[in-house]
Image (cartoon, helix red, strand yellow):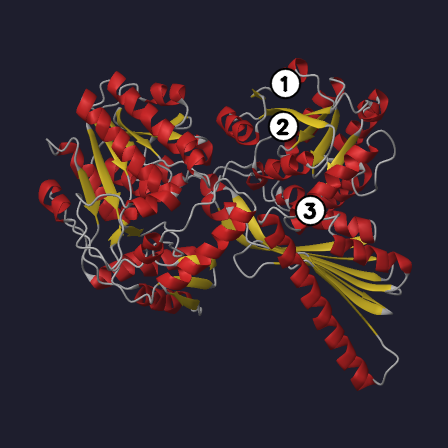
Amino acid sequence: MAASKAHTNPVTVGILGAGYISDYHFRALRLLPHLEVRAVCDLNSRLAQQFAQAKGIQNVYSDFDKMLSSEQLDVVHILTPPHIHFTNATQAIEAGVDALIEKPLCHKVSYCQQLRKHSQAAGRAIAVSNNFLYFPVYEKLVSDLRSGRLGQIDQIDIVWNKELGQLKGGPFGAWMLQSPKNILFEVAPHSFVHLIHLLGQPDEISVDVHDKLELPRGLEFYRRWEIRGWKNNTSIRLRFSFIDGYPEHYIHVRGTNAVARVDFENNTYICQEHTPYLLDIDRYANVVASARDSVLQASGTLASFVLSKMGLSKNSGPFPYSIARTIESFYNSRGGILDERIDPAISEAAVALAEWIAREADLPISYQMVSTANQFANTPTPKSTVLVIGGTGFIGQALVRRLRQEGYGVRVLARNPNSCPSELHNLGVEFAKGDFADVNAVEAALDGVRYVYHLARGNGKTWSDYLETDVKPTRQVAELCLKHGIEKLFYASSIAIYYAGKNTSTITENTEPHQGIMRVAPYARSKAENERSLLELHHKQDLPVTIFRPGVVLGRGGSPYHWGIAAWPYSSVCSLYGDGNNPLPIVLVDDVADAMVRAIEVPGIEGKSYNLTSTPCITANEYLDEFERQASIKLRRVPTSPRSSYIESLLKWAIKSIGRDPHAAFPSYADCEGRSFAAKFDSSKAEHELGWTPVQDRETIIREGIQIPVAEFFQ
């Protein structure tokens, strides 16, 4: 096999799939000697380009067969959704390439069996990356169980309680959401493979499924699963909860000699067993020993994290470390016998268990489209004259709704129209498939359009990320608008560009972006740069652009965990900007949409910008008081002074600087102090020139901006 190549001929690797897990694989590959990542492939060519540029990968493809035929690869990492693993792995094997496949092996046992036979016949190595099997704390459990230290095993509990973010924000076109059973083949294999590895296949099981959630397009998802079973005399329980809450991921094993617990979230392993002492002393000794072990292990995890940020350790955390060891194991053994934890057999057994559980759950195999009331069903849909880029977002949906109410024909540019919220479909909206960074897709979507709303935004962590994903595409959109003679272009910026601390006067549209904030906040900097670029095109080429800067936007469809109110490191903890007692520049989302739609009919506003805020009447603490009342919960509030925030930022900067992080920016006190919104905003220009009258009644803002979103969120 290719593993026998001399070191003068490095192992050449391709990556298929540029999603979030690809970063972990790439970082692990960089740690291995005599290896070269030569190419990356993803159907989303922009995503593949971004990944390749960030990682210094030379070749980019959007067609897997083309990558296999064009590159002389030894190995490919298959990081695609489970339902195409069989096809992808078959392509690799037939091309004479080994494959490391992100769990599971396939989504059907029959496919797993075919793939194993095919790889053996072709003499190719295939393996599966099960991300939690190489945690050192888990290895301690395995060692104690197999050595007999735990005694005869009475019970095994495996718990996965973690919020599934896609349930709230999508993408709803993801494979795991297309059928209620798909989660058993996407997330649950993490736990299934643990059970198989520790105990083997159960003898019997029963399944309870609860908490049905209705998603767009008639999709259904069940957020709570409980599987009970037996293996000989060992009781088995697996629990999954995908709701928001304190995260838990652990394995608890009770034996006749000892009790052991692996906590993957906290990276700890505790084993409790009797001492030679009397009962009360025995209990004391166990509590003290457990506390000591927890503190030592937690300290080690924290130290590894800090040292990795300082560039003094390659171990950046238990999860990436486990993936790195998984990948190292594959490359060390792909020419011979694979470790049992990456062998396809264990993954096939986990898939067999998933199929068994799916049968016992007796849920629909696939979703059925559910028709909902269409308020425009009896109204002919007008020709699309308005293009909304970013129409599936929070403000975007409100804008589309208002445009349709005013009788405009609307086209929405969306990456996957099938995953768009059902409300948009029911509004009689036309969809154009594409991304706003795709010039060809945007140009095609402009056909017949007179007005364009650009509400989309890029993403990333660094300024270079935003340059590529936001600034450059926005310029391209503007140039296409000029080319096609668009009558009006409306751009959604943000009040994030301003310094809003106590040391400033009233903020108007003439207030300049603060350079200290621009230096440390790439999102705000991208907004300011986009404004500059668009206005430059207005002055030089008469681009008919108008800019809106919404404040803290609240309303139906929005998350109550709003970062304009406070920082939310966790859903139960809010870090206030200052003492939380300054009235905030809140505006309701429907009022923002109203201002944007009014602008279509207002002449002479090209080249102008408008702040969109209502009269401040609610503080962060008052917002949180109402949040708590409506949700019947208690939030932990942490007042954070600008000084303490700045000191914390300095410490983070120092650690990153020691680690030679090229993106480490020296903190800005203005950024820390300006988040308090001590300054006042003046939106009178929008009121006078657009005829805009935002809701100012405090009770209405509380009802529409807090009570309804909280009720929707926790429903």
Residue at 34% across, 23% down: 476
Where does label 1 land, which residue? 67
Q: CA distance from mark 3 to mark 2?
A: 21 Å
Q: Mark 3 and mark 2 in contact? Answer it, CB < 8 Å.
A: no
Query: Is 455 situated left or right of 81 in this image?
Result: left
List x then y, in percent, for residue 392: 38, 38
Q: Residue furthest front?
A: 658
List x then y, in percent, for residue 40: 60, 25
The answer to whether any part of residue 634 appears in the image is yes
Q: Mark 1 and mark 3 in contact? Answer it, CB < 8 Å.
A: no
Amino acid beneath label 1: Met
Where does label 2 land, which residue? 16
Residue at 30% across, 43% down: 398
- Secondary structure under the numbered disc 3 in the rendered image: helix
Query: Is 383 situated left or right of 431 in this image?
Result: left
- Observer-nearest residue: 709 or 573? 573
- Secondary structure under the numbered disc 2 in the rendered image: strand
